[in-house]
Amino acid sequence: MDTALTYADSHADRFVSELEELLRIPSVSTDSAYDDEVERAAEWLADHFDGIGMEHTEIIETDGHPLVYAEHITAPDKPTVVVYGHYDVQPPDPLEEWSTDPFDPIRHDGALYARGACDDKGQMFMHAKAAEAYLSAEGDLPVNLKYIIEGEEETGSMAIETYVREQGERLDGDVVLVSDTAMFSPETPSITYGLRGLAYAEITLEGPNRDLHSGNYGGAVDNPANALSRLVAGLHDDDHRIAIPRFYEDVRDLTAAERETYAALPFDEAAWQDAIGIDDVRTEGDYTTLECLSARPTLDVNGIWGGYTGEGAKTVLPSKAHAKISMRLVPDQQLGDVYDKLEAHLEAEVPDTMTLSVRRLHGGEPVLVDPSAPPMQAAKDAMGEVRGTDPVFVRNGGTIPVVADFQNHLGLDSVLMGFGLDSDAIHSPDEHFGLDRFHQGIQAIIRFHDHYAAMA
Amino acid sequence: MDTALTYADSHADRFVSELEELLRIPSVSTDSAYDDEVERAAEWLADHFDGIGMEHTEIIETDGHPLVYAEHITAPDKPTVVVYGHYDVQPPDPLEEWSTDPFDPIRHDGALYARGACDDKGQMFMHAKAAEAYLSAEGDLPVNLKYIIEGEEETGSMAIETYVREQGERLDGDVVLVSDTAMFSPETPSITYGLRGLAYAEITLEGPNRDLHSGNYGGAVDNPANALSRLVAGLHDDDHRIAIPRFYEDVRDLTAAERETYAALPFDEAAWQDAIGIDDVRTEGDYTTLECLSARPTLDVNGIWGGYTGEGAKTVLPSKAHAKISMRLVPDQQLGDVYDKLEAHLEAEVPDTMTLSVRRLHGGEPVLVDPSAPPMQAAKDAMGEVRGTDPVFVRNGGTIPVVADFQNHLGLDSVLMGFGLDSDAIHSPDEHFGLDRFHQGIQAIIRFHDHYAAMA
């Protein structure tokens, strides 16, 4: 392990330059205009795994974007670590709010700025560099290693879900290791033991068969944009609880112990509010902000549009209005069931002047893992040694759909050892990743393989 | 009069070709990208007035788009008719729904298709052609004539409003004649004696200082798009009445006689609904559809937007959300007062997690004219002779802001003798104007001048 650590240290700068190459490829998975770039990112990554000495590398074609697979299996008695990550990124919109080109990475103030710098190209690439360090410095790894890197994480992980369900035996192993989460804070490193699920839908209301003059038709023709506002408003009650019937019936409530752990976290709520420019939160019932951010379900409008949205005034009564609405789920909510409840509620509430359509865009199930399991403890030690402070175990409000699939289809728990920070602005303009954390991540992964091999 | 009518008849085809020239100029007043084209339309029109023999023509520069003025005053004892119209047009959006280029007029099935074909280039141009017929065929007009044609009707008529207020004496006269309205139906020609006013606002809600990841922040950060939906939903009650406090206090209710007139109109509501593809109306209290369309105030969302509106899914919690909201007003509501009430209501309802801003984009006051006045009766006769059926007097749900200004600042009533039809798709894709109505309009205007001169 020590020579691997030294190797990583002495090649740190080249590692960053290589990451910059990958960040220059705009692999935006949600927009088909970028399909060729997504493909190019997969090829770049596969070539890279080849180059660092992985025994076998391949691009697995799917109905969607390709999967990149690489393995290095040298002894049947070693534990097998499956590393998961993704090479696709969010769209860079709104482009005009970026300080620099999102696909031309720059190093500034100790951080690397680009779309995907943290989520997840930067974090995923740490795993490739950890393996390179072992293979170059020591000629072998303490564990067997399988990489499965997808290109659809930002759009619902459809291809990898199918792959896990249909060809999951290829990923047979002992544990999944993932770096796609944030630490609780710079001072409080953390390992994530819970993730929320996601149900993302696009709803459309259609009223009249064409846009109408609001003077000639206003007053008698129901307006889809007004009707959509009523529908959306009706999705919450006055206590900011979700008003969809039976929405909460499968929600596993927090245990007293969990609530204590939440309460003990060093959360500076005023600073947190300040960082995002808000004066007050809007939380559910008597749950704390932290609990609402990760252990309670949510419903948010991600986008809404209809009618004239250009400069000036157009007196139009729009024929259609649309909203993208997503819900974050917690155990034991089930994705399909929650979609059904949303749809039933909307159908019941939509006025008979409108036609409603609901498209289920993508989703993922929620996850919980036992923090006392050996790989979780190996990660705790590895991260603690690198950061100088033992990490805490926390739940995360985001969603990594495939982590639930690993658990539900392959029986594999995932260790979510991420080095992001909330301030990294993932999914936002000026996404970045601190270079110190990039290098620490590589060191921690090197240590994890060693410690886990010793425990397993 | 007869030689003028014959002249108009024998030059009918050239008149259409000339109108096509004007329609080729995309004079979209609401979008500054088209400013040069708006200017070009004004110049074309002034040149045209010169060409038909108007005594004096000029382009009046303003802080906004120019006014085109033309006059022909030959005897102080003749009554003076002020003709108002507008040469600007609505944006052509959504462009992809047009069957042909909105700024390349084509004649099809007896109609002329182009943005502005009816509203208002086509109708305004009828007045130029009626004057040409008199001047060319008879060497003079039975009335003194003043044209005031603006380029900002679709964005609030700011420049002409200022002009009327500050230099209104230039428009001294006896009556205003306007063709910018629709007939009740092809079988029921009509003259409009009432117009609704308009108060058009753009509202913005700002929450967090940047777009946030909905997984990391959802559940505690109030979402501006959800909050906007609540605000908009709260603008109506369950009876489709506007829920802004004291909104209705100045609304002059319909008289029993007016309600009888409405009830007597040959309105085929099923066919009307069918034409716009709706199964049911949404009206206020026990008012009929026709009453709600023209004699009751309204509130409509004309546009709404926020967050991610592209292809696929983006899990963003938007930092801002926007809506364009307009209200149609009826006598005796006052524009400024209604804006104040809207703003006070929104300020009271906006959650303290949000910053609200309200921009007053443009507006106009409502209008009512006495149908028994001589120019109204002259118009009734002129239109009846041309259409073969006496027109009825109706109220119109649309707004022509300057008509209220003529009434309030110059004491001039307006005769709204329009030849449009609801099926002309003004403000919508495939706007068109039946060529029969274009030619009938010219004939009716020729007759109006004659009849009104005889009465006055």
Image (tube, coloured by chain):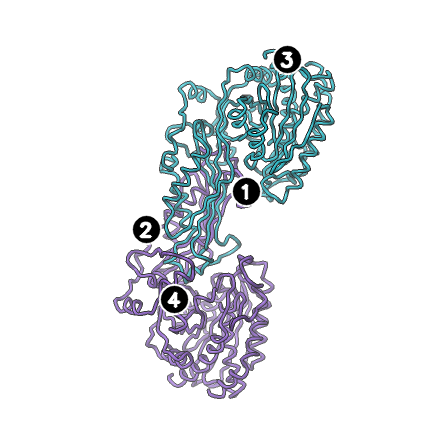
Chain colours: A purple, B cyan
Pointer 2 and pointer 4 on the same chain: yes
Q: Nearer the viewer, mark 4 or mark 1?
A: 1
Q: Secondary structure at mark 4?
A: strand
Mark seen at residue A245: 2
Q: Where, by quadrant of the figure, is residue A219 drawn?
A: top left
Q: Position of residue B370 (x, y in %)?
A: 49, 18
Report the chain holding disc 4.
A
Report the chain holding disc 2.
A
Q: Secondary structure at mark 3?
A: loop
Q: Position of residue B150 (x, y in %)?
A: 61, 32
Q: Is residue A404 above or below residue B8?
A: below
Q: CA distance from mark 3 to mark 1?
A: 44 Å
Q: Is residue A9 above or below residue A309?
A: below
Task: Give the amino acid at mark 2.
Answer: Pro
Q: Nearer the viewer, mark 2 or mark 1?
A: 1
Pointer 3 and pointer 1 on the same chain: no
Q: Is residue B53 above or below residue A360?
A: above
Residue under circle 4? Answer: A396
Instruction: Inspect this view and state whether residue A210 appears.
Output: no
Contact between marks 3 and 4 (CB within 8 A): the answer is no
Q: CA distance from mark 3 to mark 2?
A: 76 Å
Residue A54 shown left or right of residue B135 in the figure: left
Residue under circle 1? Answer: A312
